[in-house]
Image (cartoon, helix red, strand yellow):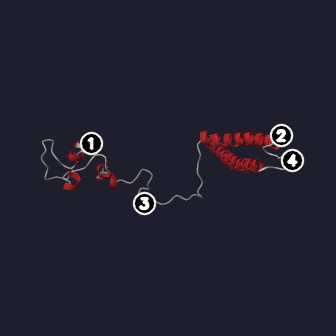
Amino acid sequence: MYGVTRGAADEAGRRPDGGKSESGPEAAPAAEAEKVDGTSVNVPALSRLTDRMPRKSAPPDGRMEPLSILEPMKLSRPVSWFLLAFGVWSWCIWFTFAKNLWKDASGLAFNAAGDPTAYFWVHLLLAVVSFLLGTAIGVIGFRGVRALRREAAQQESADH
């Protein structure tokens, strides 16, 4: 079931004939030569080349600075429209739900005396939170669409 992997042995510097290469940069410690399948030991290490290379998103000097969450961001057109549509959809759905909850005659939302039940309060809370989230998401989408249109207008005026 468990055994030494052929790839791990080759990476450790063994020749295909079973001998161990004693020289060169590919020579590895004997501990790495016996990697066992099915354990965390057989996870390959990063190559020396990728250890020295900065990530594509890193600045040219190789430093990684934290991104500020307060900096402006640019949403793509499809994402902006999706967020705006989600906000509108949320309002349509939850407005209808709240209207039906208010008119409920089944006895779930209001008891026989006409007082609201726990069911009513929980679902009203769900509707209010959904209104707030839908509004916030819709506003983000609207601002994204508006910014993209403004940017397109600026580029068009700069071209003419």
Q: Which residue matches tag 2? A: 105
Give 42 or 131, whichever is nearer the viewer: 42
Give 144 or 127, whichever is nearer the viewer: 127
At a point 58% along the width and 57% down the height, the residue shown is 71
Q: Secondary structure at mark 4?
A: loop
Give 114 or 51, whichever is nearer the viewer: 114
The tag earlier along the polypeptide, 3 or 2, is 3
Q: Check whether the beta carbons of the residues at disc 3 and disc 2 lie within 8 A of each other.
A: no
Q: Position of residue 108 (x, y in %)?
A: 78, 43
Q: Residues within 10 Å of mark 3 (few under 14, many from 20)?
A: few
Q: Residue furthest right?
A: 113
Q: Quadrant of the N terminus?
A: top left
The tag earlier along the polypeptide, 4 or 3, is 3
Q: Which mark is residue 1?
A: 1
Q: Mark 3 to mark 2: distance in Å?
A: 64 Å
Q: Position of residue 98 (x, y in %)?
A: 78, 43
Q: Quadrant of the C terminus?
A: top right
Q: Is residue 41 above or below residue 149?
A: below
